Amino acid sequence: MLQITYDESATGGGEITLQLAGAALKADAYFLALDSGCQPDSRSPTKVRAVLASLLGQWHELIASASAVDVVDLPFEFADEYIGCLRCQVGRDKVVITPGWLMTAGSTVVPSRACDTLPGADWEPQDDAAAVTVPRAELLNEIRRNQRMFSDTDSPRTDPTPIFEHFRGSYGTEMLVAAVAHFDLFGRLARLPRTLEELQQDLNLAERPAIVLTTALRAMGLLAADNANRFTLTPLAREHLVPGGPFDVGDYLGLAASAPGTLEMVERLRTNRPAGMDEGEAGAAFIYRDGVASAMEQADLARHFTLALAGRAKNVAPVLATVLDLKGVRTLLDVGGGTGIYSLALLKANPHLKAIVMDRPEVLKVAEEFAADYDVGDRFELLPGDMFADELPRADAILLSNILHDWDVPECRQLVTRCADALPASGRLFIHDVLLNDALDGPLPIALYSAALFTLTEGRAYSRAEYTGWLQEAGLQPGACRDTLIHCSVLEGVKKGFE
């Protein structure tokens, strides 16, 4: 829908092409190369890319913060006699975009700060460019994607999210077959709708597995909830998944009833215990707390799992660094920071910042290796510890990046409260994680990721409403929520009061 490219080989500083729904708009990069508000000082393609990244960040902020019926201009071309821009009529869910010009010289503004200083000049639409209506959320995602293309934070040029979705797809098969062939869930609900608590009792499941299972089935469009919060069958499930029905496909799905993955999922659902926790096994792979046998305390396994998780983190961390505004934050505590990749990306984007990564000793050995590739000096500190038991050092902000989804609700509430207590007044807690819908009915990729988390940890995916509730309980004011990559978002909580 929106694609911005930069051809540095063109004369005059290069040429920028903005493609909007099939229309291609060309712009000279000369004034971007002269920009005095962005590093490096020299006129170069690197300077142009840095200005474009800054400019797109301003675009995102303008659209994200606009109220319905607001009109905002997104500048992209700075010429001698005009400023080319996209005029956006912002609605609650849609944005109408019309290319045009502000009739004032491009030299009157600094491109990297243009959105803050645009003059109130006359605007004229382009004669040959039609208005385009796009979903607001899609426009924000496209702006952010283009920003990453020009950001000097080693961001991926393509979005790996589909790869992760394909990888997690098998959990959908296992959940569905377990519900059909092992729990007769659809037959039970066909006879009588049930609340979550009633379904737990009927299936002999604890709350966590019951939530994971019903969330996945709701995301598949097979379960719904009535006004009494009872689970009911959708027309699709009622026609095809009720045993004995004329179009029942349960026997077909039952072909996978004895598959190893299905049997493993059934065992996890019935026991409410992550893989590796039984006697003679290595211990839970991705979690550690006192009293839990953990592979993260064994050198070889800790290294293996930590490096495996880095595959996602190294894609997401640069995007998080472009999203988080850490002005005024001098020290960041990265709780459960693993390889330190998130902290290292934030240090690179914020030269004033110091980061403390807290994790288990064997994990921090890997973080030390990663830090050697970055010129961060004494701004990067490694702190061995137990996030549930040891005192958290004082910091202006705390990051929980893909941590809370490893733990059940009591532990999540405990950890959020511990972080809040460690923050000074006006301190900030950042929860960076996937978010389920507040109704716990999807989206499907996150519901399947929740199933994966369920089998490997003591947690699951949570909703923004759940996180917001824990922030408020801990005395934090929930703030902005911004998307990063691979279904992740970062939610901020600010500590109230005075010191």
Image (tube, grey):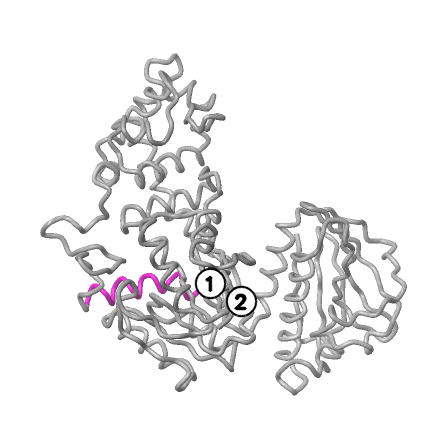
Q: Secondary structure at mark 2?
A: loop
Q: Is residue 463 visible?
A: yes
Magenta region's main secondary structure? Answer: helix
Q: Is residue 210 above or below residue 276?
A: above
- Image coordinates of residue 296 in percent, x first then y, are 22, 63
Amino acid found under the numbered disc labelled 2: Leu
Foreground disc of the pair 2, 1: 1
Amino acid found under the numbered disc labelled 1: Phe
| Residue range corresponding to the magenta coloring | 300-316
- Image coordinates of residue 209 in percent, x first then y, are 30, 39
Give the CA distance from mark 2 to mark 1.
9 Å
Determine the image quadrant of residue 58. Answer: bottom right
10 Å crowding of disc 2: few (<14), some (14-19), many (20+): some
Horizontal side of 61 relative to 281 (left or right) equals: right
* Residue drawn at (52%, 60%) of the image: 158
Q: Which residue is mark 1?
A: 430
Q: Nearer the viewer, residue 114 or 128?
A: 114
- Image coordinates of residue 290 in percent, x first then y, are 20, 60
- Image coordinates of residue 254 in percent, x first then y, are 28, 26
Q: Is residue 109 above or below residue 451?
A: below
Determine the image quadrant of residue 301. Answer: bottom left
**Tag 2–tag 1 contact (CB < 8 Å):** yes
Q: Earlier in the sequence, mark 2 or mark 1?
A: 2
Q: Is residue 482 visible?
A: no
Q: Is residue 85 above or below residue 406?
A: below
Looking at the image, the residue that sits furthest to the left is 280
Q: Nearer the viewer, residue 192 or 345?
A: 192
Q: Nearer the viewer, residue 381 or 386?
A: 386
Q: Is residue 424 above or below residue 72?
A: below
Q: Is residue 305 magenta?
A: yes
Q: Secondary structure at mark 1?
A: strand
The circle on residue 324 is 2
